[in-house]
Image (cartoon, rainbow, N blue to C red):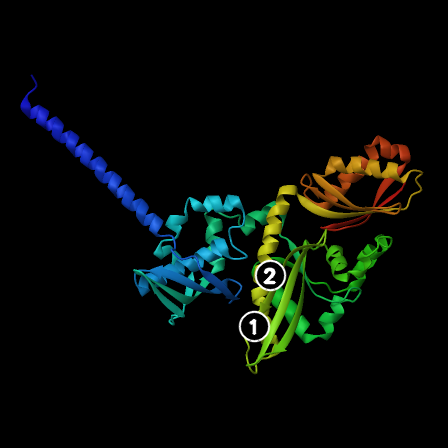
Amino acid sequence: MKPIRKVCSTRNAALRLVSLCALSIVLSACSSSTLVAQLPQSREAVFLESYSPTEVTLKAKGIGKDVEAAEKDARKCAVYFIIFNANDALLQTPAEKEAFTSQQEAFFTDENIDNYITFMGNEIISKVRSGENVKVEKLIRVNKGKLQDDLSAKGLVASKSALTEAAGNPFIMVLPEVPKGESPIAALQRNPDVKKGAEVIESYLTQRRYDVKVPEQKDQLNDLIAAKKNVKGLAEDVSYQLALSIGADVYITYNVSVEQGSRGNKGVVACRAYETTTARLLGTETGYSPERPGAPNAALIEEAMNGAIDRVLSRINGYWKDDLAQGRQYKLIFRITGNFDDPDELTDALEDVMKKVTTKRKVNIATKETVDMVAWQNQFESESKFFRAMAKEFETNKDIKKIGAKLKRINVNRKLMLLEIINS
């Protein structure tokens, strides 16, 4: 028979163990409840303006048992809106959203949210009592730039430096909208409001560390126009041709106007971003300034442009991420000047060559004189190496040898390759 003292000691130890386990479960449940409570109760917010290249101003609603708690919830709601719900939300892909979900409770602590709020108005815009809670609406400014940097540092979104290392910094060109056939450079030179619009966009982009291309001479277009003289429709779009000719990855067009309102003038601008190699529209946004009596046109245009370009830039970033999956993109224009008996035979042989050096390709136009193609590749570090690989394949392909064709370079830049197929 075991001693009574030993049995009691064992039983007490077991009871202490059970108590500790129960306490641990309770603490864990409380901790989980606390973490869940960190997420904003309200998800209602409205974008007002891009206050600066790094800050945006919102009207955000918050819910709480009193005004103080509701204001804290509004601050979280503003940050949540920038991350998830804005037109240019920081989390854009399903993978990014899934990665953030595992950390979101800890992210939305009051202490962490305060890092991103640069201003909250004293005035309560609206206040509504609902049961035991109160809902308030406040003017809140969020440091979107810092928020983006912190998400990148945590590995939740791709950082700009990582994208730059993988695909190179995208070159962006800025041009005013003009009727087809007219020169956007002339519009920049003759209209100070148009010039101001370009300056605001270029300043915004350079602050975000993008490479900005500034077109200065229209004669850069000569080779492109000559190469595409047999392709209808494209020769009239000077903005598109300029972007191609100087190697821009993306080009932004815009228009500006100053309108008379009931309380003063206001600036109205529209921005559109295009993928250069295909002229595909990536995004379009409109921006407005408040009505300000006596304000100069330049100030109104700058205020309106900040809102539009911030949202367009998010579309460019989305394009940039998608482009990485397929490789670097090029516009290839083959001008056929040699005498070949069967043009179809040459086109088929050209397709075989391109399969060897690209990951994907799309023929836009093929005639007896011209083949217009968009191609993606991720094997070669530069456009020069890419061209040399194509030329080598031309030399070794048996069908190319049979018809006696040779590849000649006319002009090669970052996005555009003007090539000539001649008799060998």
Q: Where is mark 1, residue-wise?
A: 289
Which residue is at a point 79% across and 37% down the rendered structure image? Answer: 351
Amino acid type at image mark 2: Leu
Q: Farthest bottom residue?
A: 294
Say which residue label 2 marks: 205
Q: Is residue 72 above or below residue 152?
A: below
**Nearest to N terminus: mark 2 or mark 1:** 2
* Viewer-closest of 320 and 424: 320
Asked which secondary structure carries label 2, the reply is helix
Residue 47 x, y percent position in the rendering:
50, 63
Q: Quadrant of the C terminus?
A: top right
Q: Residues within 10 Å of mark 1 (few under 14, many from 20)?
A: many
Q: Quadrant of residue 266?
A: bottom right
The residue at the far top in this view is 1
Check contact, mark 2 vs mark 1: CB within 8 A: no
Tell me if 320 is positioned left or right of 185 in this view. Answer: left
Residue 146 location (% of width, % of height): 47, 57
Viewport quadrant of the N terminus: top left
| Amino acid type, mark 1 | Ser
Residue occupying the point 69% across, 46% down: 329
Examine the rendering and report whether any part of residue 103 can be seen: yes
Q: Quadrant of residue 267?
A: bottom right
Q: Residue furthest front?
A: 131
Left or right, 109 with respect to 236, comes to left
In space, the residues marked 2 and 1 are separated at their CA atoms by 20 Å
| Mark 2 Cα-neighbour bin, 10 Å: few <14, some 14–19, many ≥20 | some
